[in-house]
Amino acid sequence: MSLSRTRMALRLDELRDSFDSSFSRPPPPQQEPGEALLRLRVGGTPLAVRLGHLSGLHLMPRLVQLPDSPASLLGVVGLRGQLIAVHDLAALLNLQTGESPRWLLLAGGTRRVGLAASGFEGQVRATREQMRPGGSSASHPLLSASVLLKDTPPLPVLDIDTLVQKLLEAAAAPQQGR
């Protein structure tokens, strides 16, 4: 009888030590399932952008238009002490521009670029299996992927990094006729 009591006491000591030491270990990293995407409406067309490629989402602040600017450049906004050029996503993607932009997406690293969208429809998570390269009959090369969500048609995913790179290159290029 005393042998089984000794085993039980040892086992209880093991369990107590294990329980106590669990508080000294860092918690295991929790991984969210899939990649976070923002659902937007651009020129009446639904699309998604990878949340990790953005540095902010704001209601459109007061926009100052610039004379003789390219068609896609809506103007500049002042945000947190920084002037940011704002481009109309609908114009950049050759989509209908029936609605005025209400949302400002900030993208880029140290040189931020503003992208204007007409609607923000929420955030979703997509697994790797739901992401499809090649888009769903994408009408623009920047919409080269799509995400398959439950009970909705394939949602085009905008390649923000490539778009920002093209905008910055165009801004740095010498202007003709000036």
Image (tube, rainbow, N blue to C red):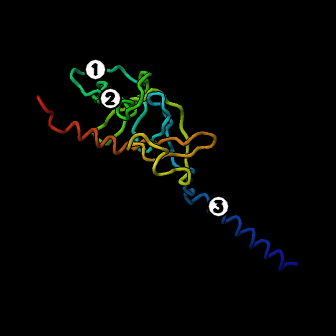
Q: Which numbered disc, 1 or 3, marks the residue closer to the eye?
A: 1
**Is 72 positioned to the left or the right of 52 in the image?**
left
Q: Residue at x 41, y 31 (%)?
A: 95
Residue 108, image x and y in percent? 33, 41
Say whether disc 1 or disc 3 marks the residue closer to the N-terminus: 3
Secondary structure under the numbered disc 2 in the rendered image: strand
Q: Which numbered disc, 2 or 3, marks the residue closer to the eye?
A: 2
Secondary structure under the numbered disc 1 in the rendered image: loop
Callout 1: 10 Å neighbours few (<14), some, many (20+)?
some
- Viewer-nearest residue: 110 or 91: 91
Residue pointed to by mark 2: 86
- Viewer-nearest residue: 17 or 36: 36
Secondary structure under the numbered disc 3 in the rendered image: helix
Q: Residue at x 84, y 77 (%)?
A: 4
Residue pointed to by mark 1: 65
Residue type highlighted by circle 1 = Gln
Residue type highlighted by circle 3 = Asp
Position of the N terminus, as image quadrant, is bottom right
Task: Please tell me whether residue 132 is drawn above or below residue 87 in the rendered image.
Answer: below
Task: Please tell me whether residue 111 is drawn above or below residue 78 in the rendered image.
Answer: below
Q: Residue at x 22, y 20 (%)?
A: 67
Residue 107, image x and y in percent? 36, 38
Q: Quadrant of residue 163?
A: top left
Residue pointed to by mark 3: 20
Residue 161: which disc?
Answer: none
Position of the C terminus, as image quadrant, is top left
Q: Residue at x 64, y 61 (%)?
A: 20
